[in-house]
Amino acid sequence: MAVPLLWVPVTIGAATAQVFRNGAQASLTGKIGTLGATQVRFVFGFPFALLFLALALAIGGTGLPPVGGTALAWCALGAVAQIGATALMLVVMKARAFGVAYAYIKTEPVIVALLGVALIGDVLSPLSWLAIGVVTAGVVLSSIRPGEARLLLSEGRLIGAGMLGGGLFGLSAIAFRAAIEAVPEGGAVLRSLTMLALSLAIQSVLLGLWLALRDREAFVGSLREWRASLGAGFLGALASSGWFIAFSLTPAANVRTLALIEMPLAALVSRRFSGGKALGRNEWLGLALVLAGLALLLAAHAA
């Protein structure tokens, strides 16, 4: 029997794991470079994804579901888009404080909602659209300090990189949801974990080949920092498992909007990872708008 709001706790759990995963990756960037830190979530996350899938198969007592060409194509698109999005996210995090980087990246929900309608026909209620708008306004407000609006215009490349990263994350979310929906057999958890393992396999191969040809030192560096890399890989696989399962239960726009519960969490860990200062008034107001938008989203689904 399906639980209508099961995607809510699953998404919150995934968001919590992702905050700490992103922080672990950000701390690795200075040691092994952006590309080296990017591949950690995929290469070191792949074994854990296989472990999660094996546990699901053992508990369910079933075999792997069949994966057709459509599911594979969507999965490959999501995998490539996510690689680019993760690299851009780490570039922004390296240039700006950990919490502020989230503000640039997490303008994603509007993009996800629009792509969901255009690409796979996901339909949202008017209240859900309002919630997405309120959350996005909160993200923008929290990113701009009083008197800094003009200054931020000089950071065009950084803002562009953050927005592009958010767009690619949005595309990957839609693609992964479409891939899961294209698997004809199996329960939500099994189909989701199968697509997760397949996507991480694709990403590990692509990044492994790139690093072998262009930047072997980055891969060697991740092995040298294996403890931190292993932790980031586990957190990445745990977060991704939650995202994929949530995608199988509700439109991706709902998941990625509720995922912004991670913004308050990111603010709390900002000092630890980047030495960020205490939140300003605009950031508190922005976070309040984010939380109000999330409340609207939950109200839309509770009705």
Image: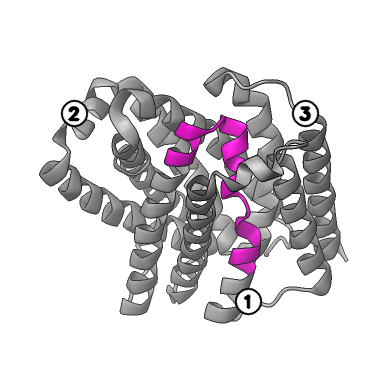
Disc 2 target residue: 220
Q: Which residues are magenta?
A: 91-113
- Disc 2 to disc 3: CB gap under 8 Å: no
For label 3, the residue is 280
Amino acid type for the residue under numbered disc 2: Val
> Looking at the figure, which quarter contains the N terminus?
bottom right
Circle 1 residue: 122
232 vs 135, nearest the viewer = 135
Pointer 1 or 2: first along the chain: 1
Residue type at mark 3: give it: Gly
Say whether residue 146 is left or right of residue 24: right
Q: Tell me if mark 3 has few (under 14), some (14-19) or many (20+) residues whose alpha carbon lies within 10 angstroms of its own.
A: few
Q: Main secondary structure of the magenta part?
A: helix
Q: Secondary structure at mark 3?
A: loop
At x 38%, y 53%, the residue is 84
Query: Residue 107 vs residue 178: left or right?
Result: right
Q: Is residue 66 visible?
A: no
Q: How is the image coloured?
A: one colour
Which amino acid type corresponds to the residue marked 1 in the rendered image? Asp
100 magenta-colored:
yes
Give the mark toward the camera: 2 or 3.
3
